[in-house]
Image (cartoon, grey):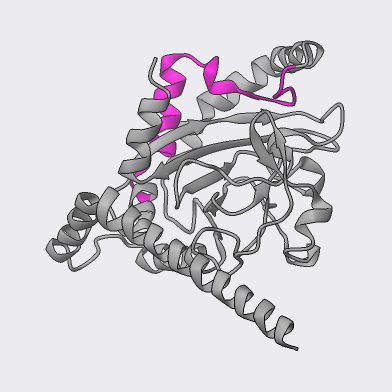
Amino acid sequence: MNINIFKIWLILEMQFYNKFKRHIKNLSWRYSENLLPTIKFNFNKIKKRKSNYSNFYEIRRIIDCVSKNGYAVSSFDQLNIKDHDKQIEPLRIFKLENESKFYEKVIANNEKNNKISYQIDILDYANEDILNSVMKIIKHPIFEKISQEYFKMVTEFWEYSSMLTFPSFDDPKMSQLWHKDPEDLMILKYFIFLDNIELDNGPLMYAPGTHHFGKIKRKPKSFKEHKASRVIDNEMIKVLPKEKWISAIGKKGTIFFADTRGYHKGGYLKKGTRWIMQGQYISPSAFLKQKIVNYK
């Protein structure tokens, strides 16, 4: 009996310690590492008491959903983003003209056993005019606004891409397995659907509530793959039932927001292709760390 009481006491003590440690880490991240960006954000809020965004309520809904669940679904129309088809059209033409070449590159990478052999970032091959056109969408001010309201601080734009994904040749690997992005405590990514995406097209899968400030704190058993932690489905089920996993499917023009500090995976196609654009915002302290790490 005394042994059981001691075990319970140890468990409770460990839970309290982990909660306290997480709380200290959160405070340090915001009020030490990102103090000035937090002050600047709040100062700007005081200066601009009234929002000049016509889609204020849609922005508020997105932020509330991502804060609570780690994800939100919107669209160009709901966010009132104009001329998106016009800005994306040069990239669409470029993709149609070169899709067979992109597929050949993926095949070649697979034969070389490249660790990412199922998708290609077509922006790496686009000319400056095409890139400048699509960046008007990827870096649209509305995304920066949403990121700052979500982080409650001034944020930094970090990465962008336009991934064209083809059917895989083997078992799921790399980002096709469950993982968390490592860059920051909070990460806001937005995935813009450039074609319709269905279940067979390898949609992004998200585990709601597993982001840093979500309610699910339990970690599934993982393994290392190229120094990154990966989780298989059978282990993720132990943390969150499969019926609660979210599939990011939708029509062209859908925008899926996700805090990718939550567990997610995607890109394991059964047929067709998946074509998206994406952008990412992180905190200024994480931005500085990434610049240092990636400095050449």
- Answer with left or right where residue 7 lies relative to residue 108: left
Residue 231 in the image, given as x and y percentages of width and height: 74, 47
- Answer with left or right where residue 76 lies relative to residue 152: right
Near-viewer residue (42 or 289): 289
- Answer with left or right where residue 130 lies relative to residue 269: left
Q: Quadrant of residue 83?
A: top left
Residue 200 in the image, given as x and y percentages of width and height: 82, 44
Near-viewer residue (226 or 45): 226
Quadrant of the image containing the N terminus: bottom right
Q: Quadrant of residue 148?
A: bottom left
In percent of the image, x 70 and y 36: which residue is there?
224
Residue 47 in the image, given as x and y percentages of width and height: 12, 62
> Is residue 139 highlighted in magenta?
yes
Work out whether residue 63 can be spotted: no
Task: Identify whether 126 is placed above or below 41.
Answer: above
> Is residue 226 highlighted in magenta?
no
Residue 243 in the image, given as x and y percentages of width and height: 79, 66
The region drawn magenta spans 114-142
